Amino acid sequence: MFPSLITRTRVPKDLAWVTATNTRAEVDPASVDVEPAGVAQVWSAVERLYRSGIHPAIQLCVRRHGEVLIDRAIGHAAGNGPDDPPHGRKVPLTPATPFNIFSASKAVTAMLVHHLAEQRLVHLTDPVCEYIPEFGAQGKDAITIQHVLTHRAGIPNMSAETMRLETLEHDEEILQHLYSARPIWRPGRRLAYHAITGGFILAEIIRRVTGKPIRTMLRDTILAPLGFRWMNYGVAPRDVSKVAVNYFTGPPLLPPLSTMLERALGLPMHQVITLTNDARFLTAVVPAGNVVSTANELSRFYQLLLNGGVLDGVQVFEPRTIRRAVQEHSYLEFDLTLVLPLRYAMGFMLGGSTLSLYGPDTSAAFGHLGFTNIISWADPERQIAGSLMTSGKPLIYPELYFLHDIMWTIGRVCTKTAPRDPRSTPRRLRARTGRARPVRRRAARR
């Protein structure tokens, strides 16, 4: 692969000028059983990835035992992409800058569906058409909610018409495309990653069962009770300019990879990146692909799951709901869309002992990737909840090893440990109050 063909951003010589740390949040590493040099090792791995020029912006937040071990950012939120003018205005990246997390949104959407199952409002083995009768057309009557959550529904691909910006403003038009779609194979028969389709189906189930749009349900179920600033589907129009800009980087995308990606997303990769920077996309609702969050808030979501559904004294999910959500359903089966062997749960990608997205020896870890180098995860054995955000959108590139090295280094410096009481308040709060706050269940809504 010739270096001159690889699209990169400009990297300053002094990285201190483009590095920001949330010093108020980060704790003493020793207080969470990490060697003080461990944080420096992790951040050094992040700097190696940034120096590659593949990612104009990188943001990392890692929680350990519920405390913030790392919350840092490096690069620019906008203005320093490969095609941006060298002397143009550059927007510094900070830990407070929100990113579109793309497919990592699927885990958020899945947990809303699991919440409905917890309340006995849906059964995951029911056919989708029991809740959306129109969906049963064209031989889709046997597709269950579980099939959709585990990428076995047989309708993995979106049409180019569906992914037009004008169409995203009209949910019903998107749903009509899905109602008329014919499955490629029988539901449950094969594993093929559903990049976009599944999210719209799940959102419509939520709307029909609760009477609420999915954006409202997410706010009422998780965001408002826990005080999240971001983490919803898209953003308000006034916040569009605050979201980190995505850039095409890396080697040219050639067949068969370009063909595979276009079939899954409905558009060529360059067009997808342009579309996702558009205000119409950033203010729309794409349940499988446009939650906007900071690394800190996304890691906080995974901390909620790691804690058995309790965070900051508020119980959002029952522990058994989370156990069901992360239970394995695909045992290193070959994914026909991603062309990789993966382990899937109902809404999550699972780790592994040797082959894993989340570092070495992470069989218990669960999380999700986002287009293309966004990783969010929880590792119960290490008591880690983390999120890695990137704004470069390559597919395969020589320095991909550096991304792997970040996850490997986190797993190495955060050794396996016995979990602490998930219902307890972080130690800094206990030190101020002298006692932990009691767990409060959210009031049931009529």
Image (cartoon, helix red, strand yellow):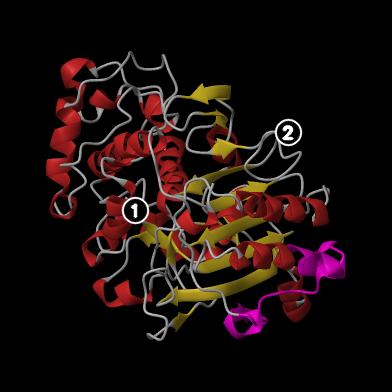
Q: Which residues are magenta?
A: 13-42
Q: Is residue 202 left or right of residue 346?
A: left
Q: Give coordinates of residue 54: x percent, y percent.
A: 52, 61
Q: Is residue 123 visible?
A: no
* Amino acid residing under circle 1: Met
Q: Is residue 157 visible?
A: yes
* Amino acid residing under circle 2: Thr
Near-viewer residue (65 or 34): 34
Q: Give coordinates of residue 20: x percent, y percent.
A: 60, 80
Above or below — where is 41 with respect to 138?
Answer: below
Q: Residues within 10 Å of mark 1 (few under 14, many from 20)?
A: some
* Residue hosting label 1: 217
**243 within the magenta span:** no
Frontmost of labels 1 and 2 is 2
**39 within the magenta span:** yes
Dividing the picture into quadrants, the one containing residue 65 is bottom right
Q: Give coordinates of residue 251: x percent, y percent.
A: 46, 51
Q: Give coordinates of residue 277: x percent, y percent.
A: 31, 64
Q: How many marks?
A: 2
Distance of mark 1 from mark 2, alpha carbons? 37 Å
* Residue hosting label 2: 354
Q: Residues within 10 Å of mark 2 (few under 14, many from 20)?
A: few
